[in-house]
Image: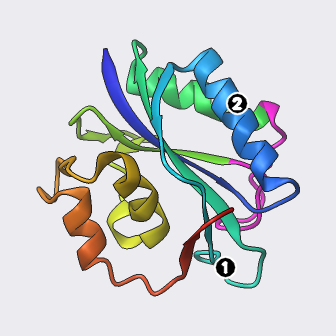
Amino acid sequence: MNEVYLLTGGNIGDRSSYLSAARNAIENYCGLIVSQSAIYETEAWGIKDQPAFLNQALAIQTEISAHDLLIAILEIEHQMGRKREVRYGPRMIDIDILLFNNDIIHSDNLVIPHPEMQNRRFALQCLFDIAAHKNHPVLHKSIAQLLADCTDPLTVNKFN
């Protein structure tokens, strides 16, 4: 069984409903959700002139490979109406694989651990809720340490 940490997010439409629909689809097509973070509202990263995001981290157990998980996630995003038009632009749903076991994967379409998670406060804060003591397999620091060291100035607040 594989232990996986995902980050979900979106900033278009009914953000809470999209996160809920993503959780349902992940359980149906990817694996059992064993833990989930609080939902956080975060300033947009990358392109700042857009609505705030809602983000949530999920811990899942799955029997599928990392590459098959990526295929399933991309299909979920597609079925939910995600269109990849502008990098870092507005989107109704985004699902990223942050960690897959302690694997280090570098392929044409998949890099694990997520190459930017240590630089993004919103990702670390969500992950901290459910995996504070989990170690980053490349940086050899816990999520708690990475969050404490993160210099990302963007605001991350719990969402009601």
| Residue 88 falls within the magenta-colored stretch | yes
Q: Earlier in the sequence, mark 1 or mark 2?
A: 1
- Image check: 142 left or right of 51? left
Q: Which x, y percent locates residue 78?
A: 76, 35
Residue position for label 2: 76
The kind of residue tagged 1 is Ile
Characterize the local packing of mark 1: few (<14), some (14-19) or many (20 or more) Cα atoms within 10 angstroms: few
Callout 1 secondary element: loop
Q: How is the image coloured?
A: rainbow
Can residue 116 be seen here? Answer: no
State the quadrant of the C terminus.
bottom right
Spatial CA span between label 1 and label 2: 24 Å
What is the quadrant of residue 123 in the picture? bottom left
What is the quadrant of residue 65 in the picture? top left
Residue at the extreme front of the image, as rendered: 160
What is the quadrant of residue 43 in the picture? bottom right
Residue ID at (24%, 78%): 149
| Residue 156 falls within the magenta-colored stretch | no
Residue ID at (76%, 57%): 91
- Image check: 49 left or right of 97? right
Q: Which x, y percent locates residue 106?
A: 31, 42
The region drawn magenta spans 79-93
Q: Which x, y percent locates residue 52?
A: 71, 73
Can residue 74 be seen here? Answer: yes
The kind of residue tagged 2 is Ile
Labels in figure, total:
2
Residue position for label 1: 47
Q: Which x, y percent locates residue 42?
A: 61, 72
Characterize the local packing of mark 2: few (<14), some (14-19) or many (20 or more) Cα atoms within 10 angstroms: many
